[in-house]
Amino acid sequence: QVQLVESGGGSVQAGGSLSLSCVVSGLSAAIPFTFYSMAWFRQAPGKEREGVAAIRSDGQTTDADSVKGRFTISRDNDANTLHLHMGSLKPEDTAIYYCAAARWYPQSPLATGGWPVWGQGTQVTVSS
């Protein structure tokens, strides 16, 4: 069974940077990491979970308007790892960040419904 474990969260001041990682395990030889699409979501207190960025198995990405130009999603296929580099952080970026996986890229990649596998999340706090 595919499992996702996020790391790299923490506290940072506004304007700073932070990088998150998500290691994928439980993969089968028949369906390796390269076959999966991946995404980052976040959920702030009292708000719904929202899509941040997604990356297809071929490397094509989709970013939420709120993070364009500040966040970069990438994947290391040799290490079965998804990354999210966050720059120019703002207090409104404060949330629990989750990674998600899907065998096929959803039609709406920034909506939660298309992603069947989720990690436990990592907290990111941005202070002003």
Image (tube, rainbow, N blue to C red):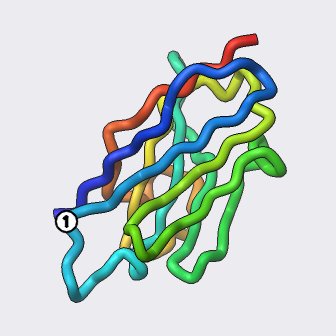
Sort mark 1 into few (<14), some (14-19) or many (20+) by Cα contacts within 10 Å: few
Of the 4 image quadrants, the one containing the N terminus is bottom left
> 9 and 50: which one is in front?
9
Residue found at x 23% / y 88%: 30
Measuring from the top left, give residue 9's x and y in whole percent: 50, 32
Left or right side of 20 for 122: left
Q: Secondary structure at mark 1?
A: loop
Quadrant hosting residue 13: top right
Indicate whether 12 appears above or below 62: above
Residue found at x 53% / y 37%: 42
Q: Name the residue type under label 1.
A: Gly
Q: How many marks?
A: 1
Residue occupied by mark 1: 26
Left or right side of 1 for 31: right
Residue found at x 36% / y 56%: 23
Quadrant hosting residue 113: bottom left
> 117 and 79: which one is in front?
79
Q: Residue furthest left?
A: 1
Measuring from the top left, give residue 8's x and y in whole percent: 48, 38
